[in-house]
Image (cartoon, rainbow, N blue to C red):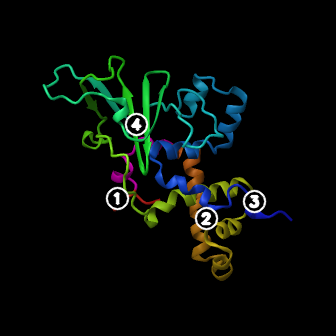
Amino acid sequence: MTDPCRDPWHPSAAYLYVLHLDGPALAWEYLRRHPDYRRDWQRHRRRAGGLARRWGLLGMENPIMDARDANPAWYPGPVQAVQLHPDLDPPVDAALFDLWHIAGHKHLFHDGHHLALTARGPARWQRFVLAPALEQGTPYVCACRAGGCSPLNLQAAPAARTVARPGRRAWLEPHTLQALDGVLAGASLREVAAALLGADAVAADWHADGALRAHVRRLVRRGDALMRGGYRRLLQRPPLEQGRLRAHAIRP
């Protein structure tokens, strides 16, 4: 008999990074788990075109890489992305574009349409689309899609930033992904519950019509729905602090 703790989905600590992902990064976490997407990747690799567009991408991305390493090129682009353009009428004290003053780990890449920049820091993601004429040291202006992020939040964060302790609501995504992985690996709902909450809690409260079993079932159902197309909604939501964690956010 194999030890279930050796299963990759079993340790909850492996999902801690999910607490700090933004909407597009979470969307990738759900998409990369889709069995059909993984088959398409194996057959066609990075081939662009209609196949990638089926998944809302400009090109296929390797599903082995999680959101910390992958940079999927979404189509259409996420609402969170801020466009940076040269300022055609800059004031005397205009801010100058400086790539290196943007805090966080930066990844600059061409997504097939334009130059894109992702900057990641503790509990903070920033996404930019750079206009072709934008150069280092030139005055610039920011543009956001309606309903997207506010230009007031685009200033570079200091290198050291205090990260608030995640609340109970924040654990929804890690638990959903862990439950989904467990079911995709062939685990039963009871086994998933034991990984999430501990064997003692399951032994005490697991009943056919109990709240614990219903909770795990909802997590699995939610994860499956997000994996099978629902991830696209995560691309069109405002940033984390203005969207999923606000008091009036839509609950699953």
Q: Say if mark 4 contacts mark 2, CB within 8 Å.
A: no
Q: Which residue is mark 2?
A: 217
Q: Kindly identify which residue carries mark 4.
A: 127
- Furthest toward the bottom, the residue is 204
Q: Amino acid at mark 2?
A: Arg
Mark 2, other Cα within 10 Å: few <14 / some 14–19 / many ≥20: some
Is residue 42 among what the camera can see? yes
Q: Residue 192: percent from the left, percent from the top?
A: 67, 65
Q: Work out how far the residue at label 3 is from the one at label 4, CA to CA, in angstroms.
A: 36 Å
User: Which amino acid does the dot numbered 1 rest on?
Assistant: Arg
Label 1 crowding class (10 Å Cα cut-off): few <14, some 14-19, many 20+? few
Give the labeled residue for mark 3. Answer: 6
Answer whether labels 3 and 4 touch (C-beta < 8 Å). Answer: no
- State the image coordinates of residue 41 (x, y, percent, origin top left): 67, 32
Q: Nearer the viewer, mark 1 or mark 3?
A: 3
150 sits left or right of 5 in the view: left
Camera-near label (1 vs 2) is 1
